[in-house]
Amino acid sequence: MNSYFKKLGTPNLFMLILCAVIILVAEYLFLTGDQLHGIFVGLWAPTLLGVMIYLKLVDHDGR
């Protein structure tokens, strides 16, 4: 399992942890009655993942 995290890389691991935190915050907001802010914050995670994928594709294209 440790080799998987080394292969993933520190920046990517940080971004995935950040996405998990964003999802938890969005769930908290949504379930405490602030549905619109929960949805708004919840959309940050897929956007961040999309940017990560795009940057990885651009990086591979340059090689």
Image (cartoon, helix red, strand yellow):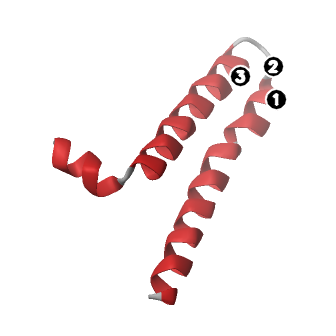
Q: Which of 27 and 19 is in front in this view?
A: 19
Tell me which residue sits at (71%, 22%) in the image: 30
What's under tag 3, amino acid-wise? Phe
Per the image, the residue denoted by label 3 is 30
| Secondary element type, mark 1 | helix
Q: Which of the 4 image quarters holds residue 28?
A: top right
Q: Are marks 1 and 2 in contact (CB under 8 Å)?
A: yes
Q: Which of 10 and 30 is in front in this view?
A: 10
Left/right of residue 18 with respect to residue 4 in the rendered view: right
Q: How crowded is mark 3: few (under 14 residues within 10 Å), some or many (20 or more)?
A: some
Per the image, the residue denoted by label 2 is 34
| Secondary element type, mark 3 | helix
Q: Residue 46's spot in the image, x, y percent?
A: 61, 51
Task: Calculate the distance from the C-alpha at mark 1 to the C-alpha at mark 2.
Answer: 6 Å
Tell me which residue sits at (56%, 61%) in the image: 52
User: For the C terminus, which image quadrant?
Assistant: bottom left
Q: Are marks 2 and 3 in contact (CB under 8 Å)?
A: yes
Tell me which residue sits at (51%, 88%) in the image: 62
Task: Calculate the distance from the C-alpha at mark 2 to the C-alpha at mark 3.
Answer: 5 Å
| Secondary element type, mark 2 | loop
Tell me which residue sits at (83%, 30%) in the image: 36
Left/right of residue 31 with respect to residue 63 in the rendered view: right
Per the image, the residue denoted by label 1 is 37
